[in-house]
Amino acid sequence: MWNSSVLSLVSLKESLECVADLMSVSAIACLENSVIENCVLRRMLKINPPITGSNRGIANSPMDHIVKIDTPHRTGLAIQIIVRNLEVESGILNIDKRTRRRSNIKTLHPNFKEIIESMHEQYSIIPNYTTNGILLDPNLIRFSVDHCGAIALSYHKNREVASLDKMRMLSDSGANAVLHVVANKSTLFSYDSIAQKFGEAGVKAIAFLLFKPAGRGKVLENEILSFEDREILDEKFRRVIEIAHEYEFIVGFDTCFAPYLATFSYSLKGTYDSCTGSRVSAYIDWDLSVRPCSFMQEEKGESLRNKTLQDIWWGNYFNDFRKSLLRANRPYCQKCSDFLYCFGGCPFFPEIVLCNRNATLL
């Protein structure tokens, strides 16, 4: 299963060359020619800073097993290229296609260092990667500090002790160490304790990623946060922010949280953004298929085998997605003063839109 989807160095080279080809297009040119109206354009230019300097080292991909490619600051575009075999969920998991049984074969990508070096040295791209941390060792950490912007650990309660040890190792090495926490029903009451423990361990940033019913999570609809959870969310996130001030780390949220953040008890407007898919980010999978978002897994996408990244970016597929962001998903959104801060939430998963306004889905 996993071996069939390993990103080869050949396909990586094709992906990076396509990214490099697009790098001559400035962020402003991209936005000026997009379908998004001028009033939204002005806001995007204000809120979407270039991916450089202090913020280029923060990995914020919502998925494990990926390397997020941050293009140089003159583009402001974030491209995600999947590396399926970086690590799987247990770190030592392999699945036999025929028997569906698991075997203890380590699955660290055999060309991992070559892939990272190619990005860093040949294409001047700063990669970040997300991992469960099981296979991180001092040698790999030193290599990552030299070649990557950030290393993000995925939080799982069953690996908390081991992850804390890895976080201390990363912190001691001087790495930009980030923690990714999936925000769902199972983790709802633990955000502040997680922040406390990893703050003490030296984390540089904690990013909360709203749970989406996609991929392996498709059957876990009971994990989706709802309107009824907002009071607890407010309480926990206020405490997380207090802990962040104490330990001097950054608190971040993926863009799916935008409807919630628009009405959060702390005034955060101007510090967050709505969906960036097709606006300043894109996703490239192991088979060179390009989509606006990594969670659009049932979408076919456009292939880099047939088109350039620039053609795909300005093509009908991406333009249609940009238009969908401007369509209000809820009746209230059409007149809401916060619409430009959240675009009405995710157009693909309306069930994850956390808005405290009593409005029914269209």
Image: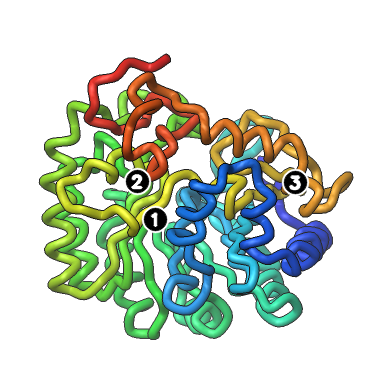
For residue 89, the mark is none
Q: Is residue 100 above or below residue 314?
A: above
Please report whichever mark, 1 or 3, sits nearer to the chain's N-terminal start: 1
Element type at marker 2? strand
Give the alpha-carbon distance from disc 1 to disc 3, as whole Å: 33 Å
Tell me if label 1 and label 3 are in contact, CB under 8 Å: no
Instruction: Indicate the position of residue 45 as horizontal and vertical percent values.
Output: 51, 60
Looking at the rendering, which quadrant does residue 232 occupy? top left
Q: Residue at x 24, y 27 (%)?
A: 357
Q: Which residue is mark 3?
A: 314
Question: Nearest the camera: 206 or 276?
Answer: 276
At label 3, the amino acid type is Trp
**Viewer-nearest of labels 1 and 3?**
3
**Viewer-nearest of labels 2 and 1?**
2
Counting other residues with Cα less than 10 Å from the Cα at mark 3, is it few (<14), some (14-19), or many (20 or more)?
some
At label 2, the amino acid type is Val
In the image, is 291 to the left or to the right of 356? Answer: right
Question: Nearest the camera: 352 or 2?
Answer: 352
Instruction: Indicate the position of residue 9 as horizontal and vertical percent values.
Output: 78, 64
Q: Is residue 51 above or below residue 260?
A: below
Whether residue 207 is visible? no
Tell me if label 2 and label 1 are in contact, CB under 8 Å: yes
Q: Which residue is mark 2?
A: 182
For residue 154, the mark is 1
Q: Residue at x 59, y 73 (%)?
A: 73
Element type at marker 1? strand
